[in-house]
Amino acid sequence: MSTPPVRNPLPRYPTGWFAVAFSRDVAPGELRALHYFGRELVLYRGQSGRAVLMDAYCPHLGAHMGHGGTIEGDEIRCPFHHWRFGPDGACTAIPWADRPMKVDVGTFPVVERNGVICTWHDAAGGPPSWQPATHKLPAGPAIGAHFFMDDVVVHAQEVMENNTDFRHLESVHSFGPWSHESLEADGATLRLRGHGSAGDLTYSGETTLHGPGYLEGVSRIGPAPFSVQLLLYVTPVDDRLCHVRCTYDVLPDPGVPLDPAMAGQIAEQGCRETERQFHLDRLIWAHKMYVERPPLSTVDGPIRQFRAWYSQFYPAAAG
Ligand code: FES
Ligand SMILES: [Fe+2]
């Protein structure tokens, strides 16, 4: 009897920047219980506006601070015995005791930009080795059209790999043929350029993968005087699931007036279509297995080059 294949033997948690929330989802003084990278976490925003991500379990007697904890200034107060911890995780106060103890909650680096709160995840606890890029955003609300997909059965690598699987654009997404122009790997960045069509529309696009967990796609559609920018984030939850977040914006060309309401409408439509397309990918991801040495044909995209680049983010590659 043969052993059934492991559906995906790759380590679940690559090292890099990953989204943990949209900025708008955590107001000053609020906290959220989160589960990412197979661990319990608490995300809060102090009264100063600073976002903090830490281990959820209180080092005192183990209460989960994401359930009943409160924010005081930029500190979090545990619901059990009201010990307080600062944004650096250090205990700052113990009620009825004259001084705090030297104990810490583990904290994680946080960067907030483009309407998304990201954290650096390294299973070995190492510091960030690169910083996430800041992207252009139109004036107006901090975040335009966006979607969130809960509990997607997939490995983070496969979400990113889709961008180099050109043929699935035709078979799964019903786009016209895609012509690949270039692929450049530079450290934690991988940039792809090409052009294609969808129905009567022609478009050209540049997709930049920033590490293992997020990408930026900028496209121009026909002669339209604007670009569309999509930022896509995938974050591993546990051994089976990931969360996917996407923001979608219309960026008018310099000097071209574009009615903000119209730009918002175009972005909203584009975002809803992208979300619909993601549901098609999701069906494939939920049931597929990972083929380690695929028999790639001459018309397949640069999947091998992508995998060689992505492998740098696995813990074994770092050590
Ligand atoms: S368990 Fe948190 S203060 Fe006691
Ligand atoms: Fe896809």
Image (spheres, grey):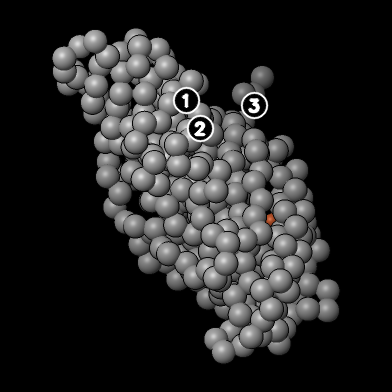
In front: 261, or 122? 261
Q: Is the residue at mark 3 in contact range of ligand 2, meaning its CB lies under 8 Å from it?
A: no
Residue situated furthest bottom in the rendering: 255
Residue at x 38% of width, y 39% of height? 46
Q: Residues within 10 Å of mark 1 (few under 14, many from 20)?
A: many
Location of mark 3 (residue): 4
Residue at x 50% of width, y 21% of height? 67
Q: How far separated are the C-alphas under marks 2 and 3?
A: 39 Å
Query: What label sits on residue 32 in the rendered view?
Result: 2
Disc 3 or disc 1, which is closer to the eye? 1
Helix, strand, or loop for circle 3? loop
Kindly identify the amino acid type of the residue bearing the numbered disc 3. Pro
Residue 187 against residue 153 in the figure, above or below: below
Q: Is 79 on the left or on the right of 266, as rendered?
A: left
Query: What label sits on residue 66 in the rendered view?
Result: 1
Q: Is 87 on the left or on the right of 237, as rendered?
A: left
Helix, strand, or loop for circle 1? loop
Residue at x 48% of width, y 33% of height? 31
Residue 169 against residue 316 in the figure, above or below: below
